[in-house]
Image: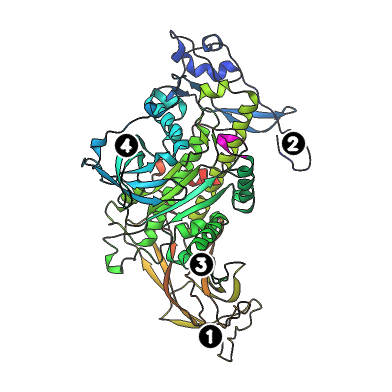
């Protein structure tokens, strides 16, 4: 069916096949064994439904789940082929029922002897639960490999982690192995002594994987998934709380793209300089600044959040040209991180489609992180960066881990409810994966940049930025610094106030080649030096200054269409003659590849085609 907004769906065609054809690959599996039920509309024993000779079948996750080959069916409308639909049969071996966690005695306990005698409180991140620093005694893992979370403020999460831990210990993990592989590693509950200036006592902690392990400065995005992040009566959610949450969903990016940014740890200096209370003059109020920053992040679209996440033009400190043979530069670091993030999000989207039953994960998050504190050595540098790049799912306070047994016991209404919220979740994952693939493609797949535009704006925290002037130049090497006049939207000269003369921008462009075997050919280095004689824009605040920032946009056109790379500078508060001294890179892809990719021969198409549309751009990205 083709969905229509103002009319009924349009019938496009239908395809029919027999259950025997779908179940045929499982005949060798069932011969001489106790018949297992086929998952689907039929409830008869599989041995009575399958016939024919022995066929090939594939086993996944060492048992408990089997996939058949992909079957191509033609869609017919009045004997005319209108398209194709791909189906795949799934045979799930039902594991023993997961034992519910009823009390403290049912929790998985961690031996206290594995850690040092005392723990240190680190503070609160996002929610209300405090985190604690744990130190391992064993040398087999890094000392800070695990982190503790206060169980008294995470009782709504412990059931999820315990059920997931029990499933992962079972053969096949009830078909949820690929999906649970993206959750944080959970070891159990630890009872330990807390070091606190006011009081010391025994504390119960959830022991989880520390994402910051070994990182100098960890940059992390906390992205809440789903266009609807609350439901009345679900997991104790009151009507008033659900209403407040629905209002937040409506005014943030959740209603636009199916997810929103809840937290941004390790923000780059350019984003740090964007004070959300700058126009109100309340920069000294820490509590108000925290709330304003959260609202700014929640309303930030994916293009902006990924732009700042991959912004490495100020930190870490870039290497010098003579150091390139031995170390990766910040541009190469950003490219590997972006590529690995797309791979991880793509894998997460496929893992969602491989789930045997829909999940109801309300308010859970996807985390994207990497170490933005240093650049590794070139030898084994790519492997190190890929290993430290994080793509994970977490925050299970309002989530349920659904299994085949649970799902079959639900009423039809509850099953439809799980399907509805699983579509919300998968839609957010799909959109995030597509946005990440698009950001990577525009940033790192260009062979030749042609036009560069400097756009100087006055930063406004409460409204759109005020346009001051722009300058467009070709992307080519300059002989030293170049000072050029800014032009307005109607191509007139921009003149500063008080007869200070025309507004100018000083810049330079140089070429930087990367040594082989780099994944990139090189990069054009754009040095943004200064601007002078800018007009004042803060007249409504009764000031005689502006808060200038510069947006740098590079454009190119190839056989696939237009490529645009946008980067932003830091904000210079109350300046008419800002000195930036910042350097931006325009990466250039290698000629033979037309875009950096890795392990082409290792690519395989998804093994399961779900009933929800998957963004083709991400699939093509991997097929490339």
The residue pinned by badge 3 equals 275
The residue pinned by badge 1 equals 533
Earlier in the chain: of badge 2 and badge 4, it is 2
Query: How many badges with numbers are in the image?
Result: 4
Q: Position of residue 206 (x, y in %)?
A: 37, 38
Residue at left offset 54%, top offset 67%: 277
Residue at left offset 64%, top offset 24%: 412
Counting other residues with Cα less than 10 Å from the Cα at mark 3, is it few (<14), some (14-19), or many (20 or more)? Answer: many
Q: Where is residue 68 in the image (x, y as percent from the top left)?
A: 49, 24
Q: In this view, does 387 lie to the left or right of 507?
A: left
Earlier in the chain: of badge 4 and badge 1, it is 4
Earlier in the chain: of badge 1 and badge 3, it is 3
Distance from Cα at disc 1 to Cα at disc 2 = 59 Å
Counting other residues with Cα less than 10 Å from the Cα at mark 2, is it few (<14), some (14-19), or many (20 or more)? Answer: few
Distance from Cα at disc 3 to Cα at disc 4 = 41 Å
The residue pinned by badge 4 equals 191
Earlier in the chain: of badge 1 and badge 2, it is 2
Please state the extent of the stretch shown in magenta in the rendering. Answer: 232-238
Say which element carries label 2.
Answer: loop
Distance from Cα at disc 1 to Cα at disc 3 = 24 Å
């Amino acid at each position: 069916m083709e969905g229509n907004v103002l009319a009924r769906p349009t019938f496009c065609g239908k395809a029919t096949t027999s259950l025997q054809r779908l179940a045929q690959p499982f005949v060798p599996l069932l011969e001489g064994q106790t018949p297992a039920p086929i998952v689907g509309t039929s409830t008869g024993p599989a041995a009575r439904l399958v016939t024919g000779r022995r066929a090939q079948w594939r086993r996944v996750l060492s048992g408990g789940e089997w996939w058949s080959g992909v079957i191509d069916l033609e869609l017919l409308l009045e004997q005319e082929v209108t398209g194709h639909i791909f189906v795949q049969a799934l045979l799930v071996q039902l594991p023993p029922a997961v034992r519910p966690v009823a009390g403290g005695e049912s929790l998985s306990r961690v031996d206290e002897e594995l850690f040092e005698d005392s723990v240190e409180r680190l503070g609160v991140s996002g929610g209300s639960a405090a985190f604690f620093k744990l130190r391992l005694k064993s040398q087999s893992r890094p000392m800070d490999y695990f982190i503790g979370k206060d169980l008294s403020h995470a009782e709504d999460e412990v059931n999820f982690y315990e059920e997931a831990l029990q499933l992962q210990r079972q053969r096949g993990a009830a078909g949820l192995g690929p999906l649970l592989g993206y959750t944080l590693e959970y070891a159990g509950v630890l009872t330990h002594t807390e070091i606190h200036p006011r009081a010391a006592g025994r504390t119960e902690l959830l022991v989880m994987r520390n994402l910051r392990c070994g990182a100098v400065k960890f940059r992390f995005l906390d992205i809440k998934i789903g266009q609807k992040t609350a439901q009345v009566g679900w997991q104790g959610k009151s009507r008033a709380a659900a209403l407040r949450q629905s209002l937040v969903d409506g005014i943030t990016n959740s209603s636009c793209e199916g997810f929103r940014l809840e937290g941004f740890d390790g923000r780059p200096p350019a984003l740090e300089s964007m004070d959300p209370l700058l126009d109100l003059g309340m920069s000294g109020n820490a509590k108000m600044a925290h709330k304003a920053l959260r609202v700014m992040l929640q309303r930030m679209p994916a293009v902006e959040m990924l732009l700042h996440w991959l912004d490495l033009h100020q930190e870490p400190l870039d290497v010098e040209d003579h150091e390139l043979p031995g170390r990766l530069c910040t541009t190469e670091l950003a490219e590997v991180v972006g590529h690995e993030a797309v791979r991880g999000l793509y894998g997460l989207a496929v893992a969602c489609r491989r789930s045997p039953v829909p999940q109801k994960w309300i308010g859970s998050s996807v985390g994207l992180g990497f170490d933005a504190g240093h650049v590794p050595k070139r030898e084994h540098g790519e492997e190190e960066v890929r290993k430290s790049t994080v793509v994970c799912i977490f925050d299970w306070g309002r989530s349920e881990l659904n299994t085949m047994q649970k799902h079959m016991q639900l009423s039809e209404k509850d099953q439809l409810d799980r399907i509805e919220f699983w579509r919300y979740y998968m839609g957010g994952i799909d959109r995030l994966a597509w946005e990440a693939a698009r950001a990577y493609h525009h940033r790192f797949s260009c062979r030749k940049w042609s036009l560069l535009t400097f756009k100087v704006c006055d930063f406004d925290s409460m409204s759109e930025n005020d346009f001051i002037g722009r300058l467009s130049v070709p992307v080519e090497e300059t002989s030293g610094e170049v000072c050029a006049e800014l032009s307005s939207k109607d191509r007139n000269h921009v003149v500063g106030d008080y007869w200070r003369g025309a507004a100018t921008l000083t810049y330079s462009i140089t070429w930087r080649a990367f040594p082989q075997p780099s994944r990139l050919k090189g990069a054009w280095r754009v040095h943004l030096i200064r601007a002078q004689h800018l007009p004042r824009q803060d007249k409504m605040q009764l000031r005689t200054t502006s808060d200038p920032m510069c947006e740098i946009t590079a454009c190119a056109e190839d056989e696939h269409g237009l490529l645009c790379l946008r980067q932003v500078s830091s904000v210079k508060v109350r300046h008419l003659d800002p000195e930036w001294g910042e350097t931006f890179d325009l990466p250039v892809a290698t000629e033979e590849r037309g875009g950096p990719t890795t392990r082409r021969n290792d690519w395989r198409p998804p093994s399961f085609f779900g009933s929800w549309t998957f963004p083709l751009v991400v699939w093509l990205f991997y097929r490339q």
